[in-house]
Image (cartoon, rainbow, N blue to C red):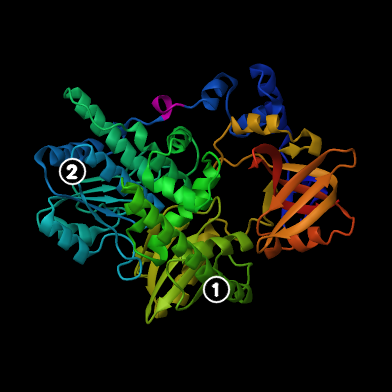
Amino acid sequence: MSAFLDVETSLTGRRWAGPSVELARYAEALEQATGLPRAVAAVLARRGVDPSEAAAFLAPTIRDTLPDPRSLKDMETAADRLLSAIDKGERVAIFADYDVDGGASAALLIDWMRGFGQAPTLYIPDRIEEGYGPNVPAMEMLADGHTLIVCVDCGTLSHEPIAAAVAKGADVVVLDHHLGGETLPPALAVVNPNRQDEAGAPGYLCAAGVVFLLLVEAGRRLREAGRTGPDLIALLDLVALATVADVAPLVEANRALVLQGLKIMARRARPGLVALGDVARMNTAPAPYHLGFLLGPRVNAGGRIGAADLGARLLATTDPNEARAMAERLDALNSERREIEAEVLAGALAQAEARGFEAPLVWAAADGWHPGVVGIVASRLKEAAHRPAVVIGFEADEGKGSGRSINGVDLGAAVQKLAAEGLITRGGGHRMAAGLSLTRAQLEPAMARLSDLLARQGAGKMGPRALDLDGILMPGAATVELIEQIEAAGPFGAGAPAPRYAFPDVVIDFAKPVGQNHLKIAFSDGLGARLEAIAFGAFDTPLGPALAGHGGARFHLAGRLELNHWNGRTMPQLRLEDAAPA
């Protein structure tokens, strides 16, 4: 199939790919069968929605899309044990991962238990001192003072730490979504849709989604006993935040959870999210973009370079003053994180480029790279090379790293295989992200083996990175009404990208740098219609210099449409992603 608009190599090095003839025909058939606008029909066609399911797709409900909690193994055991602890007033500890998903999962349980007048102990390991997941000293310490330990967003591979807690008499319940091994730890219950013995389970859920399912099951048991529990719908703001920030695919139940969660968040009832939105200068109703790029990074900042439990405590607090103080601290830490990230990224890019971007795996490692930013830097390398990427920081002989993958390549399974083969100290994750620990002596052999495993999955043989486009628009067609119609088919995010359009053969009327490396432009088709666009990070790529110094040349532009709310006005805007000479 020829390149869309004949763009074989764009300014960012991508080949433009348009919709297939079959997809275009299906979109037309959907439009005729449903009466929906063509733009909306095209989104539904790309998702494979049947005409009879279109109405339900556009208005997803939690009731219709949420899986039955009892379909997950160990769910009923976990719910019974949690309710038993509530009824008996037992001391409960929550051991959570230090990212947004872990923090939101912990806050869900804390908020829910607060409804019964109980306050569980929160424990989040220090990223540098303890690393990811349960460790033996921490679990033994918690077992000494608690009869139930609930591990959220971690624990599926923590055999020894969980065994240590069980040996001291504590029950352990794991609520996780990371890829499981061939055997499970000796926990009372391991609720994880990605256990190897699960079949047909909702593996798209993040940990907070799994926790929410547990609370749904607990609520059902309470109702069967003639009792009432806390309002679960009010907790969906946390589920939405975790789902988007953890880059869980916005499919099936996740769509309904995020849509409803955004509505709950808009009520500004949770002090922590209100304070965080204020310091992030959110001035519009929350959308997936805000969760993924404004709120999520700030919650994560505590676990990356500050106090590990700060994000979870912020999400769980009921005190507006405490929330404001924690939000300001997280905002400051996020600024510090960006500075550290920029320094590590420069070194990692130089190292990876010297090694070459053609291999199945792109990787970099060095002394002193902060373990809190290696995952973000790995994501940047992945984007630059269109290859799975791993970045590792060493302290003395111990290296801690993080990896990010591309569609179609299961990085978590490959890293887990390295651990099983003894080539790294420990490692695991899921398809798109993984973490690992290793020694200096293990570094080169482990990266060579990982590259081989990823090559077998097709990494490195995928050709130029494609930019998928849904069609052509002219500037005059990009109206507020059209964008609102498109947004009705959302939410958009991981696994459900917003439609991307090409604007062919346009003139750049205005261009200026904004911020540190962004570009603001206005363009027209020569017929009077004009559209503004923003390209974030444009000057980190050839895109910024080429468009800023256009010299009157004409371009094909590509990106996603959005609404820009400014000074009480709502205007259409293009989130510019790519361009090519016309």
User: x and y percent of residue 375 in the render?
Assistant: 47, 63
* Residue sitting at x 61%, y 30%: 44
Residue 63 shown in magenta: yes
User: x and y percent of residue 570 in the render?
Assistant: 67, 37
Q: Quadrant of the N terminus?
A: top right
**Relative to residue 366, is residue 569 drawn left or right?**
right
* Residue sitting at x 69%, y 29%: 481
Q: Secondary structure at mark 2?
A: loop
Q: Nearer the viewer, residue 60 or 91?
A: 91
Residue located beneath label 1 in the image: 343
The type of residue carrying mark 2 is Gln
User: Which label is found at residue 118?
Assistant: 2
Residue 552 shown in magenta: no
Which label's residue is closer to the chain start, 1 or 2? Answer: 2
Question: Which residue in the rendered view is the most extreme toward the bottom?
Answer: 396
Q: Which residues are magenta?
A: 61-65
Q: Quadrant of residue 406?
A: bottom right
Q: Main secondary structure of the magenta part?
A: helix
How far is mark 1 from mark 2, CA to CA? Answer: 44 Å
Identify whether 224 is placed above or below 212. Answer: above
* Residue sitting at x 39%, y 30%: 66
Q: Nearer the viewer, residue 94 or 511?
A: 511
Q: Quadrant of residue 543?
A: bottom right
The answer to whether residue 178 is visible is no
* Residue sitting at x 33%, y 53%: 322
Name the front one of labels 1 and 2. 2
